[in-house]
Amino acid sequence: MPAHDSIRENRVIKIQMDRTELKRLAQKYLEGTASDEEKALLNQWYDTTEEGWVENVHTKKPETEDQVRQRIFDNLKNKGFLKTEEVDRSDAQVSWKRLMLRITAAAAVLSLVLFGWQFSNSRFSLAEKKLVNVPGNKIIEIILPDSSKVWLNAGSVFKYPKKFSEENRTVELIEGRAFFEVKHKNKHPFIVKTNSLNVVVLGTSFDVRAYKKEGTTKVSVVTGKVGITMKGAVKKPAVMLLPKEQVVLSNIKNHLIKAVAPEIAVNAWCNSKLVFEQETLRNVFSVLEKKHHLKIITENPELLDERISITLGDQDLVSTMDILSFTKHFKYQMANDNIIIK
């Protein structure tokens, strides 16, 4: 977890202390009966109410008990929760117990305000992301906030923000296959995150295939230049790809192979064509299962490892199976919602 996120999480925990807990800690603190842990907890909670809390949590120097008390009261005074004369330390008549109710009330108010801000902010963040689930027999096109285009294949799951940040343009291909045409922006890299690797570009067109069932992740470049980084490989330099190049990552072995992309257009599937280049029949059958909503059962497991290069158009399932059976020399039969290959 990034340091900034860790600090924010720590902040949220402190903000969410309820009224009873705040009052109990404040009372014990002012009566001098609070433990070191309780003092630290209350002290850090007040830190979160100050501007610049990110820096304060980790950069404050050690303080004495009197300095801590003074800082807490100064904080409340500056925010208008206490009158100046009430917190003047030169006034020997100040009663800590008399001020306790003001302190805990102020703390409770700040707690509710900050918790409300955090809750609404988290809801806003969640609302800014769109999740797309593509049906098993569809190919859809999406125009992203920067006018880049993405085509999503059947069975794909894709997440993107309604508005990109000022630093980068990040999307997630959670499952499936996508072809991207990225609008060029020098200062705003476009990042595609998958379960196993990240793709970083400035402006280019490329294909990402990341079906979990296949056990591999493939990236093929059509135009421009693409950088590939593996998840968890922080110190390793990015693998750079040029047009007609691709990488294949084995999700099991965590091994990346760079190769020449197939001659068949990697984005031909965007036109509703099924394009396979040296693909195993296991993966071919998996695609057909998703497209036609059925199960393909193979009595000969060795057949699944055989490879095929073929482009299939919009023909029906029977025609597709006839072509495959003729090419790879197997027989099949239809049985309800299943296909049995012998």
Image (cartoon, grey):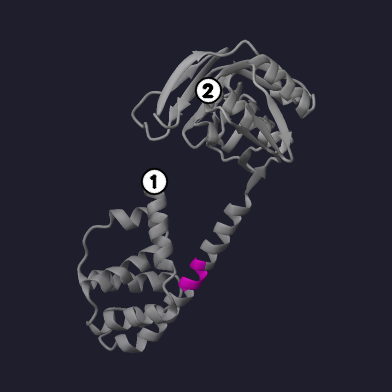
**Residue 44: x, y in percent?**
33, 65
Residue drawn at point x = 31 percent, y = 83 percent: 27
Magenta stretch: give its range.
Answer: 110-115
Dots 1 and 2: beta carbons under 8 Å?
no
- In depth, the one of 231 and 277 nearer the eye is 277
Label 1 sits on residue: 2
> Looking at the picture, does residue 165 appear above or below residue 302?
below
Q: Earlier in the sequence, mark 1 or mark 2?
A: 1
**Residue 331: x, y in percent?**
67, 23
- In depth, the one of 308 and 187 nearer the eye is 308
3D distance between C-alphas at marks 1 and 2? 42 Å
As drawn, the label of residue 305 is 2
Quadrant placement of the C terminus: top right
**Residue 214: x, y in percent?**
53, 31
**Amino acid type shown at disc 1:** Pro
| Helix, strand or loop status at disc 1 | loop
Q: Is residue 141 visible?
A: no
Most common SS among magenta residues? helix
**Amino acid type shown at disc 2:** Asp
Residue drawn at point x = 57 percent, y = 12 percent: 244
Magenta stretch encompasses residue 9 = no
As drawn, is 159 to the left or to the right of 47?
Answer: right
